[in-house]
């Protein structure tokens, strides 16, 4: 077996995780607000605090967090099933998404006991929503160059600078911000730290940015001499780079990097079933199904590595790179199938969904780290760089 494949020992979802799937499906049937496909295709951008609260009442926010902090203490396989079902139904999950996926696990791993007790129960109750403050105007792929700075003062830390592309900042209570606490931007990985920033503090300004589709899910966030108490620092001062790398593995390893266009694919197949010309697209659909099945197996394999306690950074990067290519191919393929047959009446919901996804699909390979950066990591992981 080649060295590349030896890292992907195929795993399957255990029976308990599959059994959990029927509970999730029943919940979604009962609680999912009815919505057209173009709204459901916004799933992990779709914000509904009420929906997140209903999930929390079932114990499904902070699913993998320990019971003593309010979590359900289930494993990453169960979380895979939950995330998969939420995405294929197009549930509006963005209120709790980032706290559940990465802020909670980060606080559990690196936070103090006081921070765990303060934040994790609120995350699990869907009372505390988090955003990620990594990118800055001159610091995206080159994250080590962040310039936003926290300076030690008698009362704690004084924070100044600016973050950009912060998903959901206007609706969030807290940001976990990567900032410089010593040295200069040229010092790279050294001197970075992570802070939990309460976004209601004086000196914080959030300005929404509209995307091509007219949605305003990301934002600029300004910090003008924001005073943070000492207990806002996560982990040790200067350990921010190591912590953020671990956080990015949580961000990249989930099935959401495969499913962003899945509502469109399912809706197209449903429309073809109702029309006479489904047969003409059988080969295309067969190819997409094969790609999806392979990617899903790879993603389950990455999940099994998380369950074993490993940190599959390179494997997660590989699945994210191929997964986002798949997500981007779906609107392109369906758009050209529709354009290739101008005499067929197009379902208006299909048209709106394909238009929306065609607009935003370029972002799929940017958010969470760009394709070029991931490919560099994969090459390094294979010893090619
Ligand atoms: C929808 C969306 C949501 C986002 N949400 C958040 C969020 O919540 N929080 C947050 O902090 N950020 C967020 N981001 C920002 C995202 O993480 C950055 O856009 C991304 O890391 C790229 O950084 P950049 O935009 O500064 O581009 P740059 O780093 O300037 O890159 C520009 C181009 O150059 C390429 N490039 C850069 N360096 C190299 C290299 N060394 N080798 C080869 N090619 C290279 C890149 O791949 C890219 O194609 C979001 C972005 C999007 C699109």
Image (tube, helix red, strand yellow):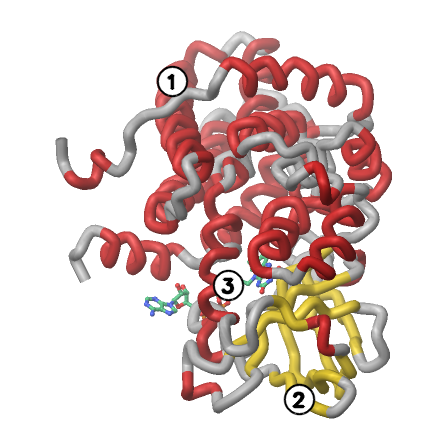
Image quadrant where one finds the C terminus = bottom left
- Could you classify mark 2 by the number of other residues whose Cα lies within 10 Å: few (under 14), some (14-19), or many (20 or more)? some
Q: Which residue is mark 3?
A: 244
Circles 3, 1 touching at the beta carbon (< 8 Å): no
Left or right placement of residue 254 versus residue 213 in this view:
left
Give the alpha-carbon distance from disc 3 to disc 2, as whole Å: 21 Å
Of labels 3 and 1, the one closer to you: 3
Left or right placement of residue 113 versus residue 135 in this view:
right
Give the alpha-carbon distance from disc 1 to disc 2, as whole Å: 59 Å
Determine whether 225 is above or below 375 in the image: below
Mark 1 CB lies closer than 8 A to ligand 1: no
Q: Secondary structure at mark 3?
A: helix
Mark 2 CB lies closer than 8 A to ligand 1: no
Instruction: State the residue lying farthest toward the left.
Output: 1
Q: Secondary structure at mark 1?
A: helix
Q: Which residue is mark 1?
A: 286
Say which of 158 and 272 sits in front.
Answer: 158
User: Which comes before the other along the chain, label 3 or label 2?
Assistant: 2
Residue 377 location, x and y as percent? Answer: 31, 57
Q: Is residue 39 visible?
A: no
User: Where on the picture, by quarter, is residue 21?
Assistant: top right
Say which of 264 and 221 sits in front.
Answer: 221
The residue located at (46%, 51%) in the rendering is 249
């Amino acid at each position: 077996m080649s060295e590349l494949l030896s890292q992907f020992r195929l795993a399957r979802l255990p029976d308990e995780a599959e059994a959990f799937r029927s509970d999730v499906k029943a919940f979604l049937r009962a609680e999912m607000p009815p919505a057209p496909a173009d709204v459901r295709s916004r799933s992990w951008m779709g914000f509904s605090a009420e929906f997140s609260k209903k999930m929390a009442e079932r114990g499904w926010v902070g699913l993998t967090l320990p019971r003593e902090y309010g979590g359900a203490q289930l494993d990453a396989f169960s979380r895979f099933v939950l995330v998969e079902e939420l995405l294929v139904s197009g549930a509006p999950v963005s209120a709790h998404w980032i706290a559940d996926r990465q802020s909670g696990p980060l606080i559990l791993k690196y936070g103090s006991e006081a921070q765990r007790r303060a934040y994790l129960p609120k995350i699990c109750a869907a009372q505390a929503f988090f955003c990620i403050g990594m990118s800055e105007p001159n610091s995206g792929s080159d994250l080590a160059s962040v310039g936003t700075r926290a300076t030690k003062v008698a009362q704690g830390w004084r924070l100044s600078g600016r973050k950009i592309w912060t998903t959901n900042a206007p609706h969030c209570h807290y940001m976990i911000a990567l900032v410089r606490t010593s040295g200069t931007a040229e010092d790279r990985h050294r001197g970075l730290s992570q802070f939990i920033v309460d976004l209601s503090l004086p000196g914080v300004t959030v300005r929404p940015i509209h995307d091509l589709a007219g949605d305003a899910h990301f934002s600029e966030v300004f910090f003008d001499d924001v005073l943070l108490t000492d207990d806002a620092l996560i982990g040790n001062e200067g350990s921010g780079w190591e912590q953020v790398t671990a956080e990015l593995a949580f961000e990249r390893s989930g099935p959401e990097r495969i499913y962003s266009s899945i509502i469109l694919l399912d809706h197209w197949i449903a429309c073809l079933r109702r029309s006479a010309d489904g047969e003409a697209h059988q080969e295309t659909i067969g190819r997409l199904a094969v790609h999806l099945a392979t990617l899903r197996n790879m993603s389950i394999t990455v999940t099994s590595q998380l369950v074993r306690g490993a940190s599959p950074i390179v494997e997660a990067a590989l699945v994210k790179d191929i997964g986002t290519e798949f997500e981007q191919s779906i609107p392109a393929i369906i758009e050209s199938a529709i354009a290739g047959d101008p005499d067929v009446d197009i379902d208006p919901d299909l048209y709106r969904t394909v238009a929306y996804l065609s607009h935003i699909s370029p972002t799929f390979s940017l958010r969470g780290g760009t394709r070029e950066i991931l490919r560099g990591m994969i090459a390094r992981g294979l010893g090619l760089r």
